[in-house]
Image: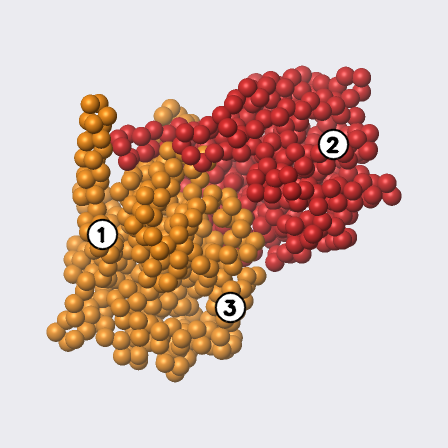
Chain colours: A red, B orange
């Protein structure tokens, strides 16, 4: 019963590509609204986070979007965890957030990824990334249009590692039927709601026969409940090869954690890079929106060079999730128009415009609409 | 006192580790074969299944025409069950151990529960620790990418392919990724030596140590240690996500580097690089071991076109070029390789159907021979 209830609310809380109808989440799970405005947790994050979330704030202010920001300045640089804990509490209160990427140190003494910890803490298990060719942004590949549904809370990111003896390390990948089932259900529901016809399960079950075998079998089992949607599977190395040679064959991909990371990066490169890809992480109770291809951009921090499109589009996804579809559509249309016109181009798209130039161009378009 | 003890212990561990790698200072995976009574090298040939027979014949024909001093010793590796485990027949093992080098066509892994893939069995039997995968754009085979020229070296024996998995309780599976320092050392040292041998000045470690701090961290740390042995080569590192993103955006910056990475990442990225140049039908591959090395075509056995004379032998041919260079028969490799590339560039009439051409295997082979 409980599982039924939760899977229902998950499926109804889905992001929409372009449809306009309001979402129908049961009230317990709704983000709180006081005096007609929603309070949204804002975690600008490290690297380019501050600049691109400033862009969102400016646009939302100009549009009078009924949102109050509760800003928490978390950073992954250094080892302080207070702000991180505060951000988790804030998200638990508000149930919805917009987030930049937090830096994760590579060295072994450094802390575990805050990004991963946040997703695990809030159990926002489904990462949705939309990979779609954008008019005006010319790349090597045309007419790409697929969605990645990535399991966000287990797999290779379990964080369970140990050293048996010096020089011998074991790292545990955990796959459970329960989590495989809910991500599979999410993927099929997503396909159903967005009028997509094919769900492909990406795996390496020929080698990891038990772990990836369980994931693949679970996706197949769930797929049988959706007779209108075709269910296929593909080995991850082949999928990566297919993605760079014939990406048009993909529709909805459902993947365990690590393969999701790999294919979202390949996918974003196909359509113009991480500066353009929106994304979100959704659970039964909470939703956090962040750029789909999670790059922190420490190297261009503070230089006013970053492309804010990914963050603006993630924010407009968030507005749809809140049922503020009119605002969402205006803002995303204005953003796509800047990209289509091609006059204002940030460095990632081989242009010379700044982050603030891009924001201004979006604002100009909004004024004319 | 305690710290001195600790120091002693770490010295001991270091020497244990050092001993675990034979000839640490000499060249890893060097070829030490001798010519036979006829003045030729004997090479084991595993023709493989499906189209394997046809593409192996193409290699033999071209080698005969080019006068390569090699005699082929064909063996069958159809698996047998030995003590309850999948194994290679002894005759095949003896042949490869004697000849030190083998060329292998595609093998069809029977699908079924608990069956270990034959490729994996071969790697384990001969301890083939490094998989070398160069990908170079080929004229006449256009893709969305020009000018690809990457070299990827994949750790081939452990990592996510350890095969250690278990069901903890029903519906909960643990799969263990195993990373050991000796295996890291060996493959990374090979990568540095390979970079030297082909004149590249940078080695790039691809990892995910931000998330897997201990396992990938060990791989990365080992690379930093090994790099000290090679002062003329620069070590760089990059997180897997970035490599995927940057490579697919533009492969050009990867030209001057040799990439080295743990097993799974290598598996995925090597196939992705193949995708950049037109697929597995054009990609060579070599599996290097302490004693023996096996060069192979990594594509499937294509049972649908087997026996019809339509198969593309390019991947096996290019793999055999890697083999010739490994055997220091570079002049033959250069000669045959330019004939292959000239044939591929000569238009659809001379290339096979998988490359949108019209040629049969036989016609393609003749065209290569005519350009020798």
For label 3, the residue is B141
Residue occupying the point 56% across, 53% down: B249
Residue A207 in which image quadrant: top left
Considering the image in quadrants, where does the N terminus of chain A appear?
A: top right
Rendered position, A249 above or below A10? below
Residue B3 located left or right of residue A328: left
First in sequence: mark 1 vs mark 3: 1
Name the foreground residue: A155 vs A197. Answer: A155
Q: Is residue B12 left or right of residue A286?
A: left
Question: Residue under mark 1: which chain is it in?
Answer: B
Classify residue A229 by image quadrant: top right
Residue marked by disc 1: B25
Residue located 56% across and 32% down the image: A102
From the image, state whether disc 3 or disc 2 is nearer to you. 2
Residue for point 74% across, 53% down: A342
Q: Is residue A12 above or below residue B307?
A: above
Residue A21 spot, x, y in % from top left: 76, 32
x, y percentage for residue A326? Answer: 80, 34
Mark 2 sits on what residue? A57
């Amino acid at each position: 019963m409980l599982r039924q209830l939760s899977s229902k609310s998950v499926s109804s809380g889905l992001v929409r590509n372009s449809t306009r109808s309001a979402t129908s989440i049961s009230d317990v799970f709704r983000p709180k609204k006081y005096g007609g405005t929603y309070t949204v947790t804002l975690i600008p994050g490290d690297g380019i986070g501050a600049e691109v979330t400033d862009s969102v704030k400016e646009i939302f202010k100009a549009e009078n979007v009924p949102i109050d920001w509760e800003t928490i300045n978390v950073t992954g640089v250094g080892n302080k965890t207070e702000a991180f804990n505060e951000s988790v509490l804030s998200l638990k209160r508000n149930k919805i957030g917009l987030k930049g990427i937090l830096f994760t140190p590579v060295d072994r003494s450094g802390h575990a990824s805050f990004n991963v910890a946040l997703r695990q803490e809030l159990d926002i298990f489904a990462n949705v990334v939309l990979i779609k060719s954008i008019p005006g942004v010319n790349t090597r590949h045309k007419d790409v249009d697929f969605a990645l549904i990535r399991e966000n809370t287990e797999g290779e990111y379990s964080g369970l590692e140990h050293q048996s003896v010096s020089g011998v390390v074991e790292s545990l990948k955990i796959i459970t039927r329960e989590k495989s089932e809910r991500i599979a259900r999410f993927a099929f529901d997503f396909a159903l709601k967005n009028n997509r016809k094919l769900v492909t399960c990406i795996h390496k079950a020929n080698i990891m026969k038990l772990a990836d075998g369980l994931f693949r079998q679970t996706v197949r089992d769930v797929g049988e409940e959706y007779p209108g949607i075709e269910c296929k599977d593909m080995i991850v190395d082949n999928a990566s090869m297919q993605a760079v040679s014939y990406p048009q064959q993909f529709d909805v991909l459902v993947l365990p954690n690590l393969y999701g990371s790999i294919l979202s990066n390949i996918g974003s490169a196909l359509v113009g890079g991480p500066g353009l890809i929106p994304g979100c992480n959704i659970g039964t109770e909470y939703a956090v929106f962040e750029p789909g291809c999670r790059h922190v951009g420490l190297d261009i921090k503070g230089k006013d060079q970053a492309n804010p499109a990914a963050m603006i589009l993630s924010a407009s996804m968030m507005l749809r999730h809140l049922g503020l579809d009119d605002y969402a559509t205006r803002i995303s249309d204005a953003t796509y128009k800047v990209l289509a016109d091609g006059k204002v181009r940030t460095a990632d798209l081989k242009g010379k415009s700044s982050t603030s130039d891009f924001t201004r161009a979006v604002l100009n378009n909004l004024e004319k609409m | 006192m305690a710290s001195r003890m600790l120091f002693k212990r770490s010295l001991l561990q270091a020497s244990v580790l050092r001993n675990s790698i034979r000839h640490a200072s000499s060249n890893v995976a060097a070829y030490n074969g001798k010519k036979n009574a006829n003045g030729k090298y004997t090479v084991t040939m595993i023709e493989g299944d499906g189209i394997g027979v046809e593409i192996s014949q193409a290699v033999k024909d071209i080698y005969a025409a080019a006068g390569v001093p090699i005699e082929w010793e064909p063996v069958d590796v159809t698996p047998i069950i030995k003590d309850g485990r999948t194994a290679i027949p002894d005759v095949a093992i003896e042949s490869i151990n004697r000849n030190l080098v083998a060329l292998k066509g595609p093998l069809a892994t029977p699908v079924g529960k608990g069956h270990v893939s034959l490729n994996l069995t071969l790697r384990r039997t001969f301890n083939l620790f490094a998989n070398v995968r160069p990908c170079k754009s080929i004229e006449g085979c256009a893709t969305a990418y020009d000018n690809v020229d990457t070299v990827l070296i994949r750790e081939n024996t452990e990592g996510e392919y350890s095969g250690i998995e278990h069901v903890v309780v029903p519906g909960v599976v643990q799969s263990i990724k195993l990373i050991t320092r000796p295996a890291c050392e060996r493959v990374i040292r090979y990568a540095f030596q390979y970079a030297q041998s082909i004149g590249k000045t940078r080695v790039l470690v691809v990892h995910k140590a931000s998330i897997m701090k201990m396992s990938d961290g060990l791989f990365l740390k080992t690379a930093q240690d090994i790099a000290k042995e090679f002062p003329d080569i620069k070590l760089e590192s990059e997180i897997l996500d970035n490599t995927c993103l940057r490579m697919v955006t533009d492969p050009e910056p990867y030209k001057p580097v040799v990439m080295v990475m743990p097993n799974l990442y290598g598996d995925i990225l090597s196939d992705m690089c193949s995708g950049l140049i037109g697929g597995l039908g054009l990609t060579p591959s070599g599996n290097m071991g302490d004693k023996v090395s096996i060069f192979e075509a990594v594509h499937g056995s294509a049972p649908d076109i087997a026996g019809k004379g339509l198969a593309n032998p390019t991947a096996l041919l290019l793999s055999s070029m890697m083999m010739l260079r490994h055997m220091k028969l570079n002049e033959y490799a250069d000669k045959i390789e330019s004939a292959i590339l000239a044939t591929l560039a000569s238009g659809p009439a001379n290339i096979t159907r998988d490359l949108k051409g019209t040629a049969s295997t036989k016609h393609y082979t003749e065209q290569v021979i005519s350009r020798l």
